[in-house]
Amino acid sequence: MEVCFVGPLGVVTGSCTWLRDIEKNWNFLIDCGMQQGETTADKWNSGEWPFDPAEIKFVVLTHAHIDHCGLIPLLYRKGFKGQIYCTKETEEIAKFLLKDAAGQPGAPFNRSDVDVIKWQEPGSEKQLGTFLPIDTNLFLQFYRTGHVMGAVSVVVRWGPPGDQKSMVFSGDLGPSGENEEGLPLLRFRMSPVACDYAVVESTYGGVVRDSVQSPNEIRRSELRQLLDKVIESKGTLILPSFSFGRTQDVLFDLHWIVAENPEKYRQATYMLDSPLACKLQKVMLKGFERQERTVSGKVRPRWLGKQVFDIFGLDGSDASQYKECLRLLTVTFASNTTSSFIPSTAGNIIAKNWRPILSPLPSRISELEGQAAGPRVVITSSGSCDGGPVASWLPKILGASQNIVAMTGHVADASVGGLLAKVMKMPPSERTRDTGNLVWANGINFPISRIKASITLLRGYSAHADQKGLLDWLFWEYKGQQHVAGRAIFIQHGGNTQREKLARAIHERAYLHETSIDIFQPSNPRDWWNLEDGASIMSTEAEAIKIDAEIARLTRAKQRLQLGGDCQLSWQGIARKVFGGIAQRTFK
């Protein structure tokens, strides 16, 4: 088996890794994503890959974010005909996200390209971690990452029993280990099995977050303070949020705060302006219902975290209370149906005070043009502030000092949200001197000098592991024994500074574990690494010499056939049989 790290190398988005075994006719990808906000995005997103899509047999997709799945429709358009292996939830969510992406300006595919994708969840009824056969002596294993619903790490295992090798791909890792869940809804990330090789993301490879205060406490404290301010000012609080994952977390926390003090916080009007999020929430609610049976016969949620039951004071092992938890989640994502809602009689005071708080948004235009009476909270997309409904809201509210814009996560520097993050650091006197503008694709400009609204950043909503979380995924203890994800570790999917800091931290953790680890930071998207006898980069010159020697041997074989008069086996047939696709491509 050989591996080529096509992307991302030195950047964060555009995940794509190419694996092949020419003798066994294995040729497949782990992820095929768009670049977003990178300087090389235009070239990358045109599909200038080092492989021929028609020769790729299948793709394994770790999760539904566009930087991991966004070029799959283009892959089909350029000749790919294989399956996309992923979890069912990733499939259902990716369909919505890809069709939304197809409608964006400059998209390299259209909605009909999304419809031709062939999705498959291998071993759909089996527990996560199960061996999933894909071909003779080729297996996959999925492990939950806690990043977003449906997200998994993937183990690729090849070779006959007793002589197998394996490589685990982290995908994007969530921030929460077992019993330390930080996101409000998702279950913890699973540790993988120990493999020969590991590929780990490094988005926050150099970041170490505060370990004293929990993300739940940070988020709710800061969000509660913002609600207090907007209730006092009777202004508008805008919460730009990504439609998948982030919006649902924000909605849950808002309901939680209101349930803690209904009399105070129900003074505000709460609205969701994100058509895509409304579609996704139906899929996510179905995913939260999904369970799996463990080897020991226990029934556990696949994606829903036990912290949700703890917040409500409900017993997840009790069937009726389990259903009650799911009912409360359903009303969390629904528009206000107070007249038909039946309050909970189970659980703690939070569960009993839980109510649907979202008011319908009959017309965005009327909301934008009208003078809202009283405080107003709007959760809206997109999280980057570049487009979607938020591009209509921001020009209307940025000019008033009683309003607040609270970013709910990291935004690219080149985005409108990134520019707002810079404005956030400016004193008011400096804003008035700035000659720049916020510019949206809808043609609207807003002068920075006119921004009077407060700009802030809500912490605690990150769906990515920090350095400690990445190390805990790579090194873990089970039943008193130390384990490591791979004896050779490839660091991918992050800026070079983040990769370098993570590499140093891996060396330090390996020293503490008294184990030896080889660490690689691939830099050339056309380099091949041989995985059969330790990870070693393959010399292009040596490979060329091998190919030339094979061509010479095949030429002699052809001459012997011609001299002997036996022409039943064609020259092309020999090339296919003896040297797979390489010789054929060489002679084209």
Image (spheres, grey):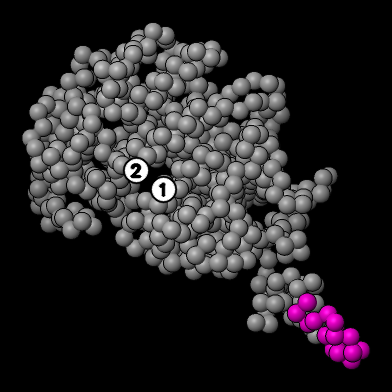
Image coords of residue 324 (percent x, y):
44, 16
Question: Quick check: is 580 in the magenta stretch?
Answer: no
Mark sitting earlier along the chain (1/2): 1
Real-space Cα separation, disc 1 to disc 2, in angstroms: 8 Å
Q: Is residue 288 left or right of residue 264?
A: right
Residue under the point 52% across and 67% down = 78
Q: Which residue is mark 2?
A: 276
Q: Disc 2 on helix, strand or loop?
A: helix
| Tag of residue 97 | 1
Badge 1 vs badge 2, beta-carbon distance below 8 Å:
yes
**Magenta span dominant secondary structure:** helix
Give the amino acid type for the residue marked by disc 2 in the picture: Leu
- Which residue is painted at 85% across and 85% down in the image? 567
* Magenta stretch in the rendered image: 556-573
Q: Position of residue 429 (x, y in %)?
A: 9, 45
Please indicate whether residue 118 sits to the left or right of residue 581 in the image: left
**Residue 527 picture quarter:** bottom right
Q: Give the total of numbered labels.
A: 2
Q: Is residue 209 left or right of residue 436?
A: right
Under circle 1, the secondary element is helix
